[in-house]
Image: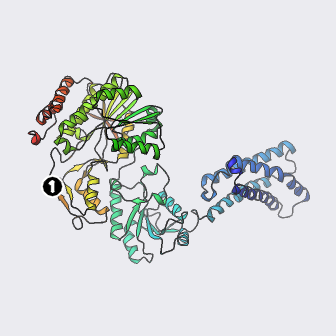
Amino acid sequence: MIHRLKSYNFYVLLVMDAALVLAAHGLSYLIRFEGALPAEHAQRLLDTLGPLLVVKLLCFLAFGLYRGMWRYTSLSDMANIAKAASAATLLIVGYLVLSRNFAGYSRSVFVLDWFFTMAFVAGLRVGIRLFYGMGFVDLPSVFRRHCPASVATRCVVIGAGNSAERLLRDIGGNPRAGIQVAALFDDDPGKQGRELHGVPVIGPVRALGRWMESDQFRAREALIAISNISGPGMREVIGHCEASGLAYRRIPSLAELAQGKVTVKDLRDVDYKDLLGREPVHLDMEGIAGYLRGRTVLVTGAGGSIGSELCRQIVAFEPGRLLLLDASESNLYAIQMEMEHERGFKRYEALLGSLQDTDWTAHVLDTYRPEVIFHAAAYKHVPMLEENPWQAVLNNVLATRNLVEAAVARGVERLLVVSTDKAVRPTNVMGASKRITEKIMQANCGRGTRLMAVRFGNVIGSAGSVIPLFRRQIERGGPLTITHPEVTRFFMTTEEACQLILQAGSMGEGGEIFVLKMGKPVRIADMAADLIRLSGKEPGRDIEIKFIGLRPGEKLYEELITADEGVVPTGHEQIMVLRSEACAHAGLDAALEALRRAAEARDHARIRQQLVEIVPEYVPDHSHDSK
């Protein structure tokens, strides 16, 4: 309030409102008495002007009419004006009834005064917005006034809904946007032939090519403003843009929109994530906050793809302290700096070390007393672990056992193990090692700590995943190397995976393996072709796709569950849960000790033999056993 009282604009607007309030009351009398104001009513007009002016301006202040930035006037501001005018009228009429029994006053005068006050005060705000060109003016003329044709990028917008409206409004209010919008295209027949902020909706998206052939505007780019478009829908839109010779960008998805307002600067290149077209995740925010807010939360592998995204999402729920644990110095430093400088979150501890160190793991838990643990630390590169299977045992299996047993012994409230679809009927060491971590989790449940695991497929763009490899190969001009024409994988985004991990963490009671619904599997060959097209090139013509054969331990397709695993739905539409196995796994400890000895001896054949003993469904690749 003090800041507003010192504002020059505040006083200007206050004086203008005062003049409008006086004009509204005077005009009400003139209309009521048809311009011939009797002397007694003229006196009553003069008697009430002072109190009426004070009451109305105080009501305007009370209802926040001077807090807004009027160049951005909205419907909520109009509602506040109506509330303030109504309250002021009731107060004035109430004062006259109590003090003068309303004797000699015309009721219609105050009805007219109420109406004119709202009309004048609201009209002033709308006029300010018109002056600044925010949304109610002819946007094409604004674009041409601010953006010379030689400078501005000439564009069309795909979509004519809420996202397009916000985009056009933001372009119109940003003289430096450098964008001219000529037309909109939308498949909704009810929008075709109409205008949005002065920009015509020409027709369906398939009409884009015909319009471009006859267009004198010479558009060069399409801005895709459909926030909830499906994967096939996005492919179709991109196809029309490419056929028309247009470059294309898009506004953020619905999940990204939830993080902030759509603006011109949010326009970005179409990404492979857009082609997946996955539905946004709906979270039980209160349920997640219930076990994270104010708690000490430990994230292992905090610098990795999943661990770092978990950290980003966890800080939104205001934990008391966040423990960042990683064995990689560079990864740990990166997430530490992000928390400190980008997220503004300073209640963290950076813990550099390996969970294979039993004493250090116990020291961390004793010193910081975490209440919730997300265990995302693991080796995951399938061919590399086929070559070095003892590392999968030491880092994935034995380190997890150290952590789980130490957490249970110290009464940690909740521990969630991040697993993988490769744990299902594994054909590689990595998958077998992750299946054992699930068994370790279940073997220790029922002892006070809520233990659970979350199983999901590949994460787009994560370290070591296929998409970064394909992008590097495209930059070099190809070829893109694929193991087999029919190989398929499940994919989801890092953000989506971590959202569902947090959601599952609120649902577990102990011993559950939660399975995230991954949608339909994606052919890697189709993914490669899509990425080539997104780079502006044509598969087979500009960049070759080359098939090199399956690598050791690699499947043609992945599974999330097996036929004998009983899966049941949960209260969340995108999360399933496997029937909880008995908490005790007879002979697991002895088998793990034998596995440890084999790993320490670097004996490939013995390691695989022990993995089969613990995970009978594991079908090993013995090509490395002689090493």
In the rendering, at what x and y percent does residue 574 appear? Answer: 35, 42
Residue farthest to the left, as pictured: 626
In this rendering, the count of numbered labels is: 1
Left or right, residue 241 beside residue 152: left
The crowd level at tag 1 (other Cα within 10 Å; few <14, some 14-19, many 20+) is few
Dividing the picture into quadrants, the one containing residue 473 is bottom left
Q: Which of 21 and 205 is in front in this view?
A: 21
Question: In the rendered view, would you say 264 is above or below 564?
Answer: below
Residue 549 visible, this angle: yes
Left or right, residue 454 beside residue 322: left
> If the image is split into quadrants, where does the C terminus sit?
top left
Left or right, residue 456 beside residue 228: left
The way the protein has been coloured in the rendering is rainbow
Identity of the residue drawn at 64% across and 57% down: 70
Q: Nearer the viewer, residue 199 or 106?
A: 199
Tell me the kind of residue under disc 1.
Ile
Circle 1 SS class: loop
In the rendering, at what x and y percent does residue 128 appear? Answer: 65, 62
The residue pinned by badge 1 equals 548
Residue 283 visible, this angle: no
In the rendering, at what x and y percent does residue 589 appear? Answer: 21, 24
Residue farthest to the right, as pictured: 39
In the rendering, at what x and y percent does residue 526 appear? Answer: 24, 57
